[in-house]
Amino acid sequence: MRSARLLRIRGVVQGVGFRPFVYRLAREHGIAGWVRNDGEGVEVHAEGSPEALDAFVDGFAAPPPAARIASCDVESVPPQGCAGFAIRGSTATGRPTVRISPDLPVCPACLAELLDPADRRHGYPYVNCTDCGPRYSIVLGLPYDRPRTTMRDWPLCPDCAREYDDPLDRRFHAQPVACPACGPGYVLESGGERWEGEEAIARAAQLLCNGGIVAVKGLGGYHLAADAGNAAAVAALRERKFRKEKPFAVMTRDLAAARSLVELDAAAEALLTGAARPIVLAPARRELPGVAPGNRDLGVMLPYTPLHHLLFAAGAPEVLVMTSANRSSEPIAYRDAEAVERLAGLADAFLVGERPIARRVDDSVARAGVLGPVILRRARGYAPGAVARLPLPGPLLAVGADLKNTVTLVVGGEAFVSQHIGDLQNYEAFVAFRETIRDLTAMYGVEEGELTVVHDLHPQYASTAFAQEIPARARLAVQHHRAHVASVLAERGAFEERVLAVALDGTGFGDDGAIWGGELFAGSLAAGFERVGHLRPAVLPGGDAAAEHPVQAAAGFLADLDNLPDLTAPPFSFPVRYLQARELVAKRLRTFPTTSMGRLFDTVAALLGFTRKVTFEGQAAIWLEQLARAAPPAEPLPLPFADGELDTRPLLAAVIEKRRRGGDEAKIARAFHRGLAKGLCQAIAALAEEHRAAAVVLSGGVFQNELLLEDLTALLTPRLPVWSNREVPPNDGGISLGQAALAVREL
């Protein structure tokens, strides 16, 4: 007796060789029927004996390497009398909710062809198959088919067409498939001269060896590449980019070169070699002058495009600085004409690929942390994956925060988080923010009038102003730190669980209009979050400007301490800006109440020697963590918790006294971290019991500090489970997901 079943598979199942996988599986088990893409994923009609159908369905447990099955619904249906198994064309009915595959690194099979002189794709920088290559960065529409990609203008040659049409070939319906005979190529342009193909790549490699800076077009935009071992080239790149001290990322020739450069444990290697191929932060084994000044960690990535491998094969230096092609604070350049214009004066040459990029996608940044892998910047390799299912009645757009912005679009209950966009106070980043929203809503067929729009509570955020302009169905404002907490719970699908949550960062608009940043909450996504504790309020002279000047933050945090020594004298040697800020505090001019943990870190950094202006966000706090890592564990400084407040005054007084007595700065920094962990643990223990919490949630940019996490989790783990972000960053890159999750309760 022949039976039939209809399977609906959702997840990352288009553009990853899923239909040919189903075809081969059907042939293996003698199944008749068909498979096709639709707006939700993949649909399969299968006919055969009940035993064969059971074995066929069981085979979906081992999908293709790049596929990710989120759900597989199976129902019995009447047989159609199919005589064989066919791969049908895509259907596009209704609003698409299919998950788009992130861009993938070149696979071993394609890499072998690339480097094989006998292969017809030898040296071809766009080699790919269904297991690898561009996806999100070339998609123009859904379902994912070649006419809806940036490869639509390159007709297939007979050889590629034969592979594309053969269900048993690994290039069956690989939408970007091409070869030297029919596909796009690369050119090198420098000083009015132009080279093509292999010569272009060879000359680019030689330029890099000679200390030149080359703009290289990659998957999601241009990089500026330079020899990481050439201090003069690195210094020139810093000067041209106006990037004073912020670390550069590097790309190594292979894993062996990475191991010689940084300390990699099994977890870090798994990240480095995984499908996302992010930049991985790891302790440096040796110094590369000028690459990461004053930092014990390096950001390292492996080659992930065929072009990268060809550059190294052509003799490029073993370790390359590979940084986003932009000036500081601008988004990465990705359109060719725009890149040539914006990067004029930065690059000595342009290695330009002919295939257009549909949207800019930066490199992702990750770390193997004490609580598992943590994403610090979510972009290439991860975006635009669905990271949560949210039971919402209609489409929703969460526009995120103004720093490290991402946006989240919820369609059909799937929460799609965009790639990292940047800091919206920069005009070009704000333009990219608007482009990303238009791009996502158009791709998923959403009209503005259908949307519920969620934004930050801060009335002066650029994202808030934009949200007010959208002709949306409804709008919601969400408090910044509650969104941090909600992002962790949304990832886990934990809607009912009561938690005790700690949200620590630099700044966020509070319910009372103050600048929050050291907050404790109790509650759940279903019931909401009550603020049950916080850092003792201080004053912040000059508002946001204090984030750029640690001594300015110190003037506010130290205002309530008695018997302060002269901090302009050694060993503190605060500059005159501190005295000016003290006057603002004394006169209560342009001062704002704050519970910011980020500014507390800045204050301690200033007391221990970081008295200059920061040149990138979080620099003083990173400096303080690096300083503390140079010392062994120390006796914790006092940070008492009472009546819902963590009192910073005893801690700051202890820092001042130890420094005044000539104490070692690294040991004091270590004692500060230990004291902060102990104080937080005591607060968590007291509040978790009072509010019957089943777990502890940690989120916010301060929890990028791995030393603090190590100290805190060592104290907390025996007591309660500790949850932190896994799919989105703990910093403001996770805010949009948290905003969307908090809208569930309101809607």
Image (cartoon, rainbow, N blue to C red):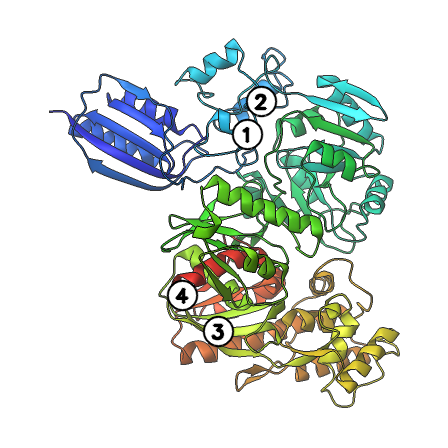
- Residue flagged by tag 3: what amino acid is it? Phe
Give the answer, above or below, for where 245 lies relative to 17.
Answer: below
Q: Which mark is residue 746?
A: 4
**Side (left or right) of 81 relative to 695:** left
The spot of residue 525 in percent (x, y) is 41, 65
Q: Check whether the beta carbons of the residues at disc 1 and disc 4 lie within 8 A of each other.
A: no
**95 above or below 246?**
above
Instruction: Determine crowd level at label 1: few under 14, some 14-19, many 20+ residues with C-alpha closer than 10 A.
Output: many
Q: Is residue 128 left or right of residue 559?
A: left
Closer to the N terminus: mark 1 or mark 4? 1
Disc 2: CA contacts within 10 A as few (<14), some (14-19) or many (>=20)? many
Spatial CA distance of label 3 from label 1 is 43 Å
Q: Earlier in the sequence, mark 4 or mark 3?
A: 3
Q: Which residue is mark 2?
A: 127
| Amino acid at dot 4 | Glu
10 Å crowding of disc 4: few (<14), some (14-19), many (20+): few
Whole-Å distance between the Cαs marked 1 and 4? 41 Å
Residue 676 visible to an observer of this rendering: yes
Q: CA distance from mark 4 to mark 2?
A: 48 Å
The image quadrant of residue 566 is: bottom right
* Label 1 – label 2 distance at C-alpha: 8 Å
Name the amino acid type tagged 2: Val
- Disc sitting over residue 521 in the figure: 3
**Tag 1: amino acid:** Gly
Residues under numbered marks 4 and 3 in contact, where contact means CB atoms less than 8 Å apart: no
Q: Which mark is residue 133?
A: 1
